[in-house]
Amino acid sequence: MFFHVILTTECNLQCSYCFGEALEDVDADFQGFDVDYSLPKKINYDISLLDKLCRQDSDCIFTFYGGEPLLCIEEIKQIMDNVEAKYFLIQTNGLLLDHLEPEYVNRFHTILVSIDGDEALTDFYRGKGTFRKVIDNLKLIKRNGFGGELIARMTIMEQTDICKQVTWLVDNEEFSFSSVHWQLNAGFWKNDFARRDFKRWSEENYNPGIRKLVKFWVDYMEENRAVLRLYPFLGISQSLLSCEKTSLLRCGGGWINYAIQTDGHIVPCPTMWGMKDYYLGHISNADPLKLKKVFVGEPCTKCDVFHICGGRCLYANVTKRWAAEDYTLVCNTVRNLVDAVAKELPRIRKSIENGRISLKNFEFMKYNGCEIIP
Ligand code: SF4
Ligand code: SF4
């Protein structure tokens, strides 16, 4: 099992698509959901309970999460010193990576670091100076011996040219990433659709950009005999190549990847913190292998691409923050993505057949925090 361990609800950044949207959304009703807005700011249960949880599942994997988890460095060290998890991962904005000693950083199996693309775009969304500090820290942890997977985790919306920014992240003079994932800021806030330009951007910019990017990805395979770990493409192509069908969320939310709130309650995913209707247990007495499972409902269960999409997002599916006709645009991005990858399958298969790459190159740790479907 995978667990996001939410160490704190606080963050040291005020990104426009998170803090900014939250400010604009402050009056939005939560459609009858009972939400606990008074969770402790920091983890307030006994850390030994995490160890107790892990002892019941030898494959227990913990991802430190927040807010910004590196605001809780002492708790991270305490957990890593005392809990026998199979792996530790962290999802961080990267600003405080230099505050954690290399002996801990180097034990992370994966670091997912928030970066939205080049300096201008990252600083536009995340605040001036963010890019430089994060890149300096990434260079530092590499110098200090970090050898795990480093994933650039982008949040994207209307200011993002997906093809330009992903190709920049994988090849630039500052710090090139071999792993990139992106998540659309879409369907998470109640009132933002009306003030945004999502329809035009998704149809005229993002969808064509994805088709261009898939072509770049497959060209790269042919020319360099290597598969860039662009997670949305990796996940979908792996399923198509192996004829795998899924009706389960690819992020794992609610069925294999849960979140533990700062007060110890277990919820299907970190975004669903405080949603009391979805409290699935408490760390003090939960059996990790017998946690209740929660699945997406309509419209996903009636959708013709459900078997490959998996439902995109449980939070969006149950809260329905965007009206159905607006959310259709998000589903259109999923269809476009799947179609773009499917159209390139013959070229991918050919590269496998002639030994340029192998099926092994498409393997990855599932549920590592990359949702696959952006
Ligand atoms: S494309 Fe949309 S409706 Fe279809 S399964 Fe995915 S999120 Fe659900
Ligand atoms: S995709 Fe949705 S359900 Fe999955 S982890 Fe992200 S917010 Fe949660």
Image: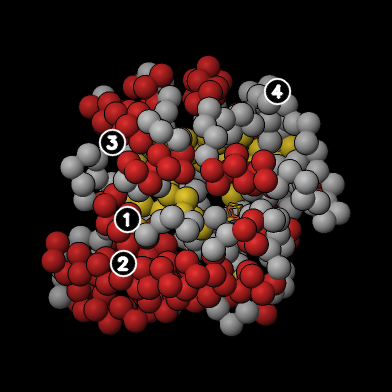
Judged by depth in the image, the label closer to the viewer, 2 or 4, is: 2
| Label 2 with label 1: CB-CB less than 8 Å | yes
Q: Secondary structure at mark 3?
A: loop
State the mark number for residue 324: none
Report how far apart the C-alphas of labels 1 and 3 lie in the structure. 22 Å
Q: Amino acid at mark 4?
A: Asn
Q: Is residue 127 above or below residue 331?
A: above
Nearer to us in this view, 226 or 40:
40
Q: Amino acid at mark 2?
A: Leu
Residue that mark 2 sits on: 213
| Label 2 with label 3: CB-CB less than 8 Å | no
Determine crowd level at label 2: few under 14, some 14-19, many 20+ residues with C-alpha closer than 10 A: many
Residue at 55% across, 78% down = 305
Q: Secondary structure at mark 4?
A: loop
Determine crowd level at label 3: few under 14, some 14-19, many 20+ residues with C-alpha closer than 10 A: some
Q: Secondary structure at mark 1?
A: helix
Q: Quarter-wise, where is residue 347 in the image?
A: bottom left
Residue at 27% across, 65% down = 217
Determine crowd level at label 1: few under 14, some 14-19, many 20+ residues with C-alpha closer than 10 A: many
Q: Is residue 69 above or below residue 221?
A: above
Q: Quarter-wise, where is residue 319 in the image?
A: bottom right
Q: Secondary structure at mark 2?
A: helix
Residue that mark 4 sits on: 44
| Left or right placement of residue 201 versus residue 258 in this view | left
Residue that mark 1 sits on: 166
Residue that mark 3 sits on: 147
Report how far apart the C-alphas of labels 2 and 3 lie in the structure. 27 Å
Q: Amino acid at mark 3?
A: Gly
